[in-house]
Image (cartoon, rainbow, N blue to C red):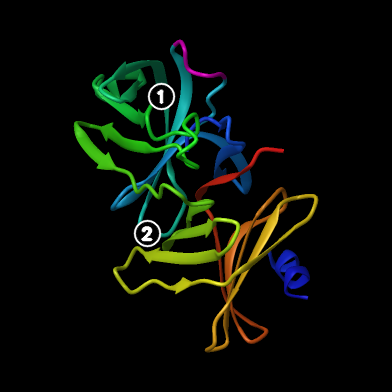
Amino acid sequence: MKKRMLLACALTWAGANAAGYEMKSYVALDGKKQEAFAWCDAPDRVLALTQVREKPTKPQPATLVTWLKGRSGGPNRDTIQLGAGEGAAGSVFYAISGPGQKLPPNDYVRLSNIENVQDPSYRMSRVVSFRLAHKDYSCRYVKDATFIGVTQKRTVIIWNNGKAVTYATRNFDGSAGVYVTGGTVEHDDTGPVYLFETSSGYSYIVTYDQRANFVQVLRGNKVQSTEHFLAYSSSSPKP
């Protein structure tokens, strides 16, 4: 019932490892989901690189997307040049430059080449930081997460280790988030729907599929809020 009501309401390059996990990352632009090369849950903003045409072994055009936390409205977009990856000290650096010196030439996105899905110890690939206009933006990382996504108001995290399914939030305004375990998940032909219920009567529903991508809060059967994901990454067993 809640799944039908939910559907009515509306980090990095995908990779797989020998242990059978696959990670996919997306951003939402103009009401449509696009693959993300990398995205970052930084302290004061969400950053993403999208419209990357091929795995970056050579320079190519891409789009840098920026949402400022705590502000409404659409994101800022810059057309940039994404450089080929260069490895150094456990990381791979991809240079970011802009036309007409709009962005300084020393900007980059830094990805871990240790904490990534090529290593069976990790379900998520780590985006370490962005450097833009000579300023570093460190990125939130959750090693064992099944899902991590951001809305305009909070970060949403789901863990699913096959025994317990847990939900947590990190609110951007500094208020306390929630932590709920004992969740359930249903799968259909489009994707998963997670349900978490509390003894106080609140329910949290998270879905990310071909039709809708959001977190919804209910009290009883009444919808309290629906927040759409700006960016998210998921890690699931490889088919």
On-image quarter of the N terminus: bottom right
**Magenta part mainly helix, strand or loop?**
loop
Is 217 situated left or right of 238 in this image? left
Q: Quadrant of residue 237?
A: top right
Classify mark 1: residues with Cα within 10 Å, few (<14), some (14-19) or many (20+).
some
Q: Quadrant of residue 6?
A: bottom right
The range drawn in magenta is 54-58
Task: Please provide percent x and percent y for residue 65.
Answer: 43, 39
Of the two numbered discs 2 and 1 on the same chain, state the one appearing first in sequence. Answer: 2
- For the point 80% across and 50% down, which residue is it? 189
Up-down: is 58 above or below 114?
A: above
Task: Please provide percent x and percent y for residue 23.
Answer: 56, 38
Is 19 situated left or right of 101 in this image? right
Question: Relative to the observer, which residue lies in front, 211 or 20?
Answer: 20
- For the point 50% across and 66% down, which residue is it? 167
Question: Relative to the observer, which residue lies in front, 97 or 192?
Answer: 192
Q: Which residue is mark 2?
A: 71
What kind of residue is marked 2? Arg
Q: Secondary structure at mark 2?
A: loop
Q: Which residue is mark 1?
A: 80
Up-down: is 236 above or below 158?
A: above
What kind of residue is marked 1? Ile
- For the point 39% across and 71% down, which residue is it? 177
Classify mark 2: residues with Cα within 10 Å, few (<14), some (14-19) or many (20+).
few
Residue placed furthest toward the top: 58
* Residue 32 included in the magenta stretch of the image: no
- For the point 42% across and 62% down, which residue is it? 154
